[in-house]
Amino acid sequence: MTHSARGFYDSLAADYHRVFADWDASIARQAAALDGLLRRELGGPGPHRLLDCACGIGTQAIGLARAGHRVVGSDLSPVAATRAAAEARTRGVDLRTAAADMRQLPFRDGVFDAVVCADNSIAHLLSTADLEAALHEMRRVLRDDGLLLLTLRDYDEARRTRPASVPPQVSEDSGGRSITFQLWHWHDDGEHYDQEYFQLVPEGDGWEVRVRHTTSWALTRRAVADAATAAGFTDAAWHAPADSGFYQPVCVARAA
């Protein structure tokens, strides 16, 4: 069964910060890694005009705006995009957001210096046609020689080992400790899998268990690079976490 990505993230938006042991620390750490890549690839500190086309609740967008870039965030989930704007305001950060499918971005041609698509977002595009449509839109809104920064799980390894779960993450906020973990159910094709996404949230003397479902495509690095080339990007290269400082492999490509 294929589950709606929008429904999944609409439901998760209020709890998404619980995915991180310390969300504010993650905002700062991820922004530092991505900003380093932007400075190196685009030259100089900017400010650059950035689109975060899968902004979620603002994990990358808030930090990049705080670093001085002019950032717009969009997300398939209107609930997540609304929370991103509210979280930015709380932190004194200027961030405009919009609800938008990355396959149909509501922005003019060539208006951004860089597009960020992080946190495994493209894995929710479940066909080659959808993947290429999204990458074509990212290319369209980039200026010539603009930069794509796309992050993805190490699915080359995952497709070899086919893990059944992801290690639990413990986080803590004003409401107490929470636990997040995933169970993966692989499809027969060995490429797609359904996720059962569990969160245990403090409730009185016990726990409330929140379960959400979604489907992902375990995209190989080669498949992403080939789709990027077909969409009009060149020089696609992957940077490992040890090199970039980001927690997932990062694909960097140029708008031809």
Image: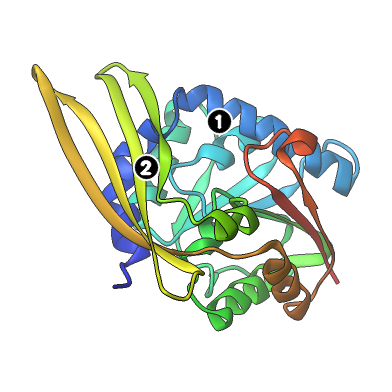
Q: Label 1 crowding class (10 Å Cα cut-off): few <14, some 14-19, many 20+?
A: some
Q: Is residue 164 left or right of residue 52?
A: left
State the image coordinates of residue 246 (x, y, percent, origin top left). Answer: 67, 37
**Residue furthest toward the front?**
161
Identity of the residue drawn at 62% across and 53% down? 157
Query: Is there any visible trace of residue 33 in the rendered image?
Result: yes
x, y (%) of residue 202? 18, 24
- Residue contact between numbered discs 1 and 2, judged by CB atoms under 8 Å: no
Horizontal placement of 70 versus 173: left or right? right
Q: Quadrant of the N terminus?
A: bottom left
Where is 199 relative to 159, above or below? above
Quadrant of residue 19 in the image? top left
Helix, strand, or loop for circle 1? Answer: helix
Q: Which residue is mark 1?
A: 27
Q: Read off the residue under disc 2.
A: 83
Residue at x-position 24% and y-position 19%: 175
Q: Position of residue 118 (x, y in %)?
A: 59, 50
- Residue 52 is situated, as x and y percent measured from the top left of the image, at 59, 52
